[in-house]
């Protein structure tokens, strides 16, 4: 029997709990006798929860560790330390059958629909491939019917089942990638820049499809992207990463309208705002200097080399991701987790207008 494609409706309990997650890639010298000379601290102590049925957006500049986090959440990369609890079980320590069972419930949709689909496989084989690993979901005789159903679910004609990836547009290919992600009826989908490679006009269609599927199947998403407007459009909560750490995390309103971390404020101040009045009112923050190397990050606060508010304390003391003491007990939207010693609201006016069409 094929399992039903629908799930229980969303609830407000954590489905993933990430605790102090670290991934260091060793830097080596020498060919025969490799000597470790340091490490790229791609992810360096990150904690957050993902609630059942929600979308958690993750934003941050290129190289800040977003894709590495995505891979760690699926145990595609071995964590250096830290934990990822899926329904209370630490998946960083799982292997073999136990890991396989968990992976069925946590799937991934990748950025590039052009390279992530095997050009020599038909769409039917691509979408049905996960059933080879998990035949219990759709036994052999049921597979084609199941693939047709999945094509229909993502808005593609089930008659396309024998076509090859090159016969589809970018947006259609990403729908195929999503259908494959859905094949095993997962609970969580980790989306790493799922629309970044698509034309702007197609991006909205794919994002809308993802929202529809989330409602239909009670999915939880981790949605990684560069584009702050798209992330706001789809996310319930948003985490802002900088150089392997989480700078700030909160609901979309807290982050976009009441950011308290200077890095978030700088990112938002650079987003184009359609409303000319808001544009005039707001202060544009230009960040100076390059992002430091993750192999040699600054002491204390990682953002201090580019922060206009940096003081001596920022070099000495690492700010923790917590509700800043100035806001403790307040019911202001500024009272959300921010890793800054001097967290404060700043009028990056116009940030309220950052929204996808
Ligand atoms: N396998 C690897 N070996 C060594 N370093 C790596 C490896 N994978 C990633 N890195 C490094 O880790 C850091 C974080 O990379 P990651 O791909 O996670 O960033 P990202 O935020 O996804 O960037 P982008 O927005 O460009 O996709 C980068 O400095 C990258 O060069
Ligand atoms: S801790 Fe200091 S350097 Fe870091 S963001 Fe806050 S003010 Fe800037
Ligand atoms: Mg990436």
Image: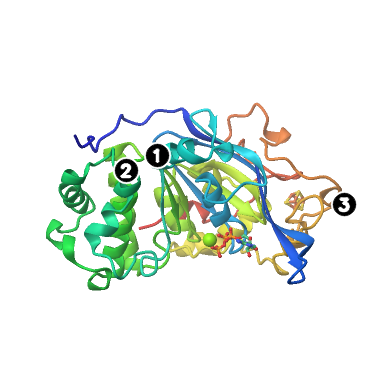
The part of the image, by quadrant, that contains residue 118 is bottom left
Is the Cβ of the residue at disc 1 closer than 8 Å to that at disc 3?
A: no
The image position of residue 189, as x and y in percent, is: 40, 46
Side (left or right) of 315 relative to 43? right
Mark in front: 1 vs 3: 1
* Mark 1 lies on residue: 105
The image position of residue 207, as x and y in percent, is: 34, 54
Disc number at residue 135? none
Q: Quadrant of the C terminus?
A: bottom left
The part of the image, by quadrant, that contains residue 287 is bottom right
Which of these two is toward me, 327 or 80? 80
Disc tally is 3
Q: CA–CA distance between discs 1 and 2?
A: 7 Å
Relative height, residue 178 to residue 114 (above, below): above
- First in sequence, mark 1 or 3: give its number: 1
Disc number at residue 312? 3
* Mark 2 lies on residue: 184
- First in sequence, mark 1 or 2: give its number: 1
Label 3 crowd (10 A; few <14 / some 14-19 / many >=20): few
Q: Is mark 3 within 8 Å of ligand 2?
A: no
Label 2 crowd (10 A; few <14 / some 14-19 / many >=20): many
Is the Cβ of the residue at disc 1 closer than 8 Å to that at disc 2?
A: yes
Q: Residue furthest front?
A: 32
Q: Is mark 2 within 8 Å of ligand 3?
A: no
The image position of residue 133, as x and y in percent, is: 35, 46
Is the Cβ of the residue at disc 3 closer than 8 Å to that at disc 2?
A: no
Q: Secondary structure at mark 1?
A: helix
């Amino acid at each position: 029997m094929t399992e039903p494609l629908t799930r229980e409706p969303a609830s407000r309990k954590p489905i993933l709990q990430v605790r102090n997650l670290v991934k260091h890639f060793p830097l080596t010298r020498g060919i025969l006798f490799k000597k470790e000379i340091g490490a790229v601290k791609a992810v360096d102590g990150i904690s957050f929860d993902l609630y059942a049925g929600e979308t958690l957006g993750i934003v941050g500049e290129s190289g800040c560790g977003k894709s590495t986090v995505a891979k760690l959440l699926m145990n595609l990369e071995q964590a250096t330390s830290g934990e990822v609890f899926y329904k209370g079980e630490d998946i960083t320590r799982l292997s073999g059958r136990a890991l396989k069972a968990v992976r069925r419930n946590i799937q991934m949709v990748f950025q590039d629909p052009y390279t992530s689909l095997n050009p020599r496989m038909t769409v039917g084989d691509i979408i049905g491939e996960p059933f080879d690993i998990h035949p219990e979901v759709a036994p052999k005789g049921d597979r084609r019917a199941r693939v047709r159903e999945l094509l229909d679910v993502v808005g593609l004609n089930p008659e396309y089942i024998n076509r090859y990836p090159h016969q589809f547009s970018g947006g259609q290919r990403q729908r195929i990638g999503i259908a494959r992600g859905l094949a095993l009826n997962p609970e969580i989908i980790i989306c790493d820049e799922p629309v970044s490679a698509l034309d702007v006009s197609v991006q909205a269609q794919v994002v809308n499809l993802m929202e529809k599927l989330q409602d239909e199947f009670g999915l939880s998403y981790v949605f990684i992207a560069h584009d702050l407007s798209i992330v706001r459009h789809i996310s319930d909560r948003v985490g802002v990463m900088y150089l392997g750490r989480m700078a700030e995390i909160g609901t979309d309103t807290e982050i976009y309208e009441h950011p308290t971390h200077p890095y978030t404020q700088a990112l938002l101040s650079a987003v184009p705002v359609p409303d000319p009045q808001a544009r005039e009112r707001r202060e544009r923050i230009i960040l100076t200097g390059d992002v430091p190397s993750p192999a040699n990050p600054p002491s204390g606060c990682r953002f201090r080399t580019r922060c206009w508010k940096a003081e001596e304390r920022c070099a000495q003391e690492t700010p923790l991701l917590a509700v800043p003491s100035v806001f403790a007990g307040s019911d202001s939207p500024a009272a959300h987790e921010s890793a800054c010693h001097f967290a404060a609201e700043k009028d990056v006016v116009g940030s309220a207008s950052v929204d996808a069409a």
